[in-house]
Image: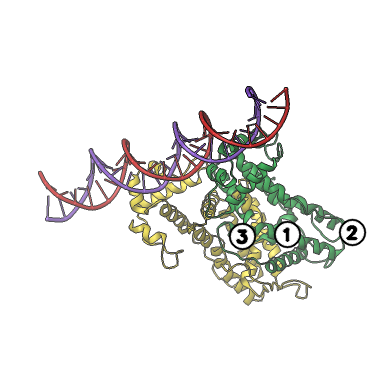
Chain colours: A green, B yellow, C purple, D red
Amino acid sequence: MDLAATISEGTNGVSDAGDDPTPRQKAVLDAALALIVDPKAALTMSSLARAASCSKESLYKWFGDRDGLLTATVQWQAAKVRGMPVRREELGRDRLEASLERFAADWLTVLSGETSVALNRLAIGDAAGGGGRNLGRIVLQNGPVAMGRRLTPLLELGREAGLLAFDDAGEAFRDFFGLVVRDVQIRLLLGDRIDLSPSDIRVGAARATRQFLVLYGAGQRPDGPQSANPDFASIGKE
Amino acid sequence: MDLAATISEGTNGVSDAGDDPTPRQKAVLDAALALIVDPKAALTMSSLARAASCSKESLYKWFGDRDGLLTATVQWQAAKVRGMPVRREELGRDRLEASLERFAADWLTVLSGETSVALNRLAIGDAAGGGGRNLGRIVLQNGPVAMGRRLTPLLELGREAGLLAFDDAGEAFRDFFGLVVRDVQIRLLLGDRIDLSPSDIRVGAARATRQFLVLYGAGQRPDGPQSANPDFASIGKE
DNA sequence: TCAGTACCGTACCGTACGTTACGGCTGCGG
DNA sequence: CCGCAGCCGTAACGTACGGTACGGTACTGA
């Protein structure tokens, strides 16, 4: 009940990881992820204990209760996804385009992965009970918000270099998000079968990047009638 | 068990509505919707029987089992949303823009409604169990697919009128979808509190429409270096 | 050797929920 | 009036699952 107390709630209730899980616990969390991803399996305390070859008593000792286990599992997966920092080389227009494209491709790859789909489903189902777990917030922080945190600096750099034109980097990011993701995520979540081959991802990322540069590019067509004026109220407060 | 048999499966397993529900059954389905929407309530057969003042025996007679009830509820809500056909007046550029804007605003309004959020959560949670209910397909058909079916004719008209330029109407629609929805839906599903006032919706719809016309508009800037060339592999097959 | 710790495996308990069954009420055709 | 169909309310049953308790085992340190 000690680790659970630090995991399930903290000062802000979102990003505190408490103690790092021990290797044994990491193995258990991986087993939990496998159960969540498996469509024909259900994550129950008993099934996890059986799959991970541990006792339910240990599960409760380590994670407190089922909620703590889910929270730790989501955070464990989130910790594994982190990385791929955008390195700020001196960027020209080609370099910026390549960075955006790579970013979009990486994001589509993660997004369409069965792990991401399964965890988003879990968090959404959890958010349904209005009581208020924090799974939704955790996934949100490691999903769109993390994407924004990593992309915004690149956009700012592009603006400083005179390659992009926008007032609100957050709005620009959200447009990029929409152009990249479109209806892919909601369709995946609803169970639509999408193959999404690597070449599809590459092509889609290139299209989204090209369209984004048409909307926000400043290096060319500086007198376009409506090239970049995203001045409207922000939605949500993240 | 009769209505359930016709509802839960048919020739294609998606859009068959079987017999129309009687007024009494409609009232029950409305009560079911209310329970699904209510964050602090859960839709159980007992709670629905209590809320709708009917017996559980009647529920099972009318809908077969819990799955049939959920299916009928989703279809009932879908039947209520249909409407607002796009009337094809002779459209100039302003008329096209206004239609797109209205379409985007309507869609954002429906999307951000608590009923839509709750039903999408329900269908997503249902799609998690890979076994395969059809709730996901039903919501999909009445969500993005229905939006595409209603918007595509308008886009085709715009192209015939020389106002839009695209090769694949489906791709153009998906880009419009992304520009309109962006990250709003996934954030709502994950429980993020978004107020989204009517003015926010209006402004957002206007922005998305403007951006879409920048990407796909053909009436002006006919020599833009990259104005409209969405020629890439289609993702998914709807 | 022995106490303590950590853990596994399993049996157990309470509850929630899907599903079925039964008794009682109302309206309607004969 | 009788039989019956439809429906309500409620009790009852079976199961699944979260959570707890208990016995058994391996390791550690005194």
- Residue shown at 62% from the left, 52% from the top: B186
- Residue shown at 69% from the left, 43% from the top: A23
In front here: B184 or B61?
A: B61
* Direction from residue B47 to residue B154 in the image, left or right: right
Q: Position of residue B74 (x, y in %)?
A: 47, 55
Query: Are the residues under badges 2 and 3 in a single subunit?
Result: no
Residue marked by disc 1: A106
| Residue type indicated by callout 1 | Asp
| Residue type indicated by callout 3 | Ala
User: Which quarter of the figure has residue B105?
Assistant: bottom right
Residue marked by disc 2: A90
Label 1 element class: helix
Q: Position of residue B178 (x, y in %)?
A: 65, 61
In front here: A2 or B201?
A: A2
Residue marked by disc 3: B104
Instruction: For marks 1 and 3, give the CA distance.
Output: 29 Å
